[in-house]
Image (cartoon, rainbow, N blue to C red):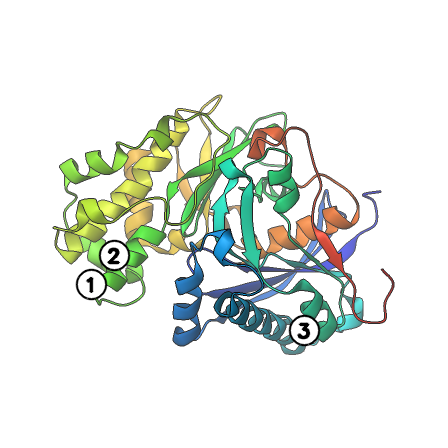
Amino acid sequence: MAEETLTAIGLMSGTSMDGIDAALLQTDGERIAGFGPSLCVAYEPMFRNRLRAVVGRDPADTSGSDTEVGGVAEDLTGYHVEAVRRLISDNGLDAATIDVIGFHGHTIFHDPEHGVTRQIGNGERLAGETGIPVVSDFRTNDVAHGGQGAPFAPLYHAALSWNYEKPLGVLNIGGVANVTWISPDGGLVAFDTGPGNALIDDWVRRNGDGEMDLDGHLAHAGQVDENVLETLLDNPYFARPYPKSLDRDEFSLDPVSHLSVADGAATLTAFSAAAVDKAVHLFPALPNRWLVCGGGRHNPAMMAALRKILLQPVEPAEMAGWQGDALEAQAFAFLAVRSLKGLPLSLPSTTGVSEPVTGGVLHHPEGVGD
């Protein structure tokens, strides 16, 4: 059933909590037929702080009776409605030509070892206010079948890279970093490598220097503390076999707390890169090249750290003709179409799920069939 090409909008609110990426994609769920426009809707600082405050909540504290989480979820949904409407209006699109929206929501709690992953956001409301069918809740079925519930973009990475030399490593650096290893025969391995931007962002914010290390200026000005780096890397997560995944707040800033702002940024940047290097040793074979997507590729200090520690060429995703800023949103457009067609969203080698499983919950606009 994968022959019919559909037009989908994908939405992603990632662990960096900077805003929502929205992108249009045409696909049959296996091949990419065409790329459309994309945009980012930034969160207002006050909302970002509210969102940050509910991240990490135990699911027992995030029931429908929790008005704080409920309010954040509804406001988050409003931002997504705005993103869809802007993508359509700014590009002269007709909502009637959009077959589905892939709505990831925002992860506030991720503990797959105990069978829990929670993304907030109201898919029913999004469908009602846009008039477009919505697929949401992508990860729950994976976790229910023994999977890690992450990472979820590998099948899209494979579809993008069908004509590239392999083995290929695709590294996504968001708040958490994850990797997709693609073999010459199309086999996939995927897992979270460790921190991406989250620790650096939190460090900069804690020290009152903004929301991020813009252009890596702080890291470039600092020195890596090798002893602290060794302490950070002394974590059992890195030796664990894949599949594996991380919560955004898995790692602590305590080891760098005594460093200067610049030295802390330099050390945390080196930590994210060194975690990727540790991941390489878990691959079946070395990749021929790395393609980097996610916000981290905009950080020259991060890219320099990766190029210093990895043996293979490290390039931004744009070098392959990919749209790096839109890629995660495109992935959930792709997965929404796969969900509609009953195709797998995750595999044993990508999340550790017991068998290839589909997932997602479909919400129709009001007045449209079940």
* Tags 3 and 2 touching, CB below 8 Å: no
Q: Quadrant of the C terminus?
A: bottom right
Cα distance, mark 2 to mark 1?
6 Å
Mark-to-mark CA distance, 1 and 3: 39 Å
Q: How many labels does the image show?
A: 3
The answer to which quarter of the image holds residue 98 is: bottom right
Badge 3 marks a residue whose secondary structure is: helix
Up-down relation of residue 147 to residue 5 (above or below) = above
336 sits left or right of 179 in the view: right
Residues 315 and 243: in front is: 243
Image marks 2 and 1: residues in contact by CB distance under 8 Å: yes
Taking the image as shown, residue 262 lies to the left or right of residue 367, namely left
What's the residue at 68%, 29% (across, down)?
Answer: 355
For label 2, count other residues whose C-alpha is less than 10 Å away and answer few (under 14), some (14-19) or many (20+).
many
Q: Give the residue displayed 71% in from the left and 41% down from the top.
A: 358
Residue marked by disc 1: 207
Ranked by sequence position, the earlier of labels 3 and 2 is 3
Task: Report the amino acid beneath label 3.
Answer: Ile
Return the mark for residue 203: 2
- Location of mark 3 (residue): 88
**Left or right, residue 195 beside residue 25:** left
**Kind of residue sitting beneath label 2:** Trp
The kind of secondary structure element at disc 1 is loop
- SS at badge 2: helix
